[in-house]
Image (cartoon, rainbow, N blue to C red):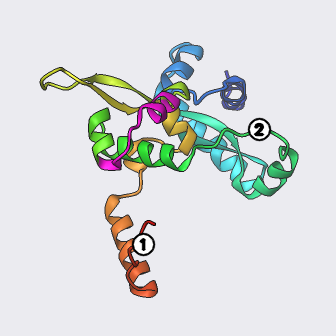
Amino acid sequence: MTENNLKAVIEALLFASDKPLPLERMRNALDNMDTGQIRSILEELKSDYEKSERGVRITEIAGGFQIITAPSFAPFLKKLYKDRHTDKLSKPALETLAIIAYKQPVTKLEVESLRSVNVDGVFYSLMDKGLIRVAGRKKAPGRPKVYGTTAQFLEYFGLKSLEELPKIENFQTALSDKEAIDGPKEPTQAN
């Protein structure tokens, strides 16, 4: 097979896949071709798309590769899909998910103690969406379940791996900078 044919085959594999396609699955589809050669062709395709300013890009995400739309065309896609129902995460779900992402593996009780609220419903919703999973059991009395994020979590947030999560220190710096500009936040009194 010529290099152009290989590019076309890899492009077709990516286009047909509804999820990020790992190198190993591409390798199997390409009769055990060397993964280094596949990665090299993927890099060439990525470069071709960017140089020709196409509407799509190839990105590495959640342990695989996927064809995505170019971010610069987001306004047009929003107009196209403006009536489409999107399932957004609520603020409590995002807060809970952030705790799980940064502290995993973590028990439900540990999350509840950090959030100071019951998280049963939020956990059910996040598991139903496939963003968290039971990652095992803690070696503690009662052997409580511990939770972690899933590959679907990485896809949802467009991350290659958990190492791409913003560093906690960056949040502290941003918060300190905001307080320096706005002044300290005054406590509110409940009536």
Q: Residue 110 location in percent, x, y?
A: 26, 40
What is the C-alpha distance between the residues marked 2 and 1? Answer: 36 Å
In the image, the segment drawn in magenta is 114-126
Is residue 118 within the magenta segment?
yes
Does residue 50 lie above or below 128 as drawn? below
Q: Amino acid at mark 1?
A: Thr
**Residue visible at 49% across and 47% down?**
92
Question: Does residue 43 lie above or below 138 as drawn?
Answer: below
Name the element at disc 2.
loop
Q: Which quadrant holds residue 2?
A: top right
Q: Is residue 175 magenta?
A: no
Q: Is residue 128 depicted above or below 109 in this figure? A: above
Residue of label 1: 188
At 19% from the left and 21% from the top, the residue drawn is 143
Work out which quarter of the rendered image holds the C terminus and state it: bottom left
Label 2 sits on what residue type? His
Residue 95 image point, x, y percent:
44, 49
The reply to whether residue 37 is visible in this rendering is no
Image coordinates for residue 94, horizontal then vertical, percent = 49, 47
**Tag shown at residue 85:** 2
